[in-house]
Image (cartoon, grey):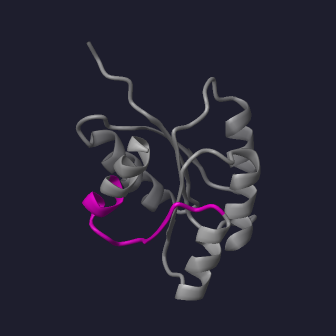
Amino acid sequence: MPQHKPLLVLLEDDPDEAHLLQWQLQQHPEPGFQVLVAETLAAFFQLLKNLPEQPALLLVDLNLPDSSGLNTVTACRSCLPDVPLVVHSGWFDVAEQKDLLAAGAQACLTKGQPPAVLINQLLKLLER
């Protein structure tokens, strides 16, 4: 019997990065992920309106065309306060990381790390 793949919403404005992450997450064996991508915060909100179920995870880039930094996390948290959120960004400093975690992010990971690091973090959050 096929296992249900958790739904992950990826908020990422770089199409190449989004495509690569989507492929890596979908190809991961057990459970693998269903991945939906939004390139802007506005597209994210529109996507959520059309989902038949709440996502299991959010993977969020901080710098988008219509939002940046802490505002991006706060906006995501405002509509999905109970869904685990992982920040996946090119760079953030220690102070910003503390603020992001205080705003509701469960983890902050820098882009460019091996896919296994990201996937392991996401799987840990699913187990909670």
Q: Quadrant of residue 50?
A: top right
- In the image, residue 101 lies at what x, y percent? 59, 69
> Is 108 covered by the magenta stretch?
yes
* Residue at 35%, 60% in the rendered image: 118
- In the image, residue 90 lies at what x, y percent? 48, 76
- 5 to the left or right of 101: left
Give whichever of 120, 32 is nearer the camera: 120
Picture quarter with the N terminus: top left
- 22 to the left or right of 49: left
- In the image, residue 36 lies at what x, y percent? 52, 40
- Residue, far left: 29
Q: Quadrant of residue 29?
A: top left
- 47 to the left or right of 109: right
* Residue at 34%, 40% in the rendered image: 26
The residue segment tinted magenta is 104-119
Picture quarter with the C terminus: top left
Give whichever of 124, 39 is nearer the camera: 124
* Residue at 32%, 71% in the rendered image: 113
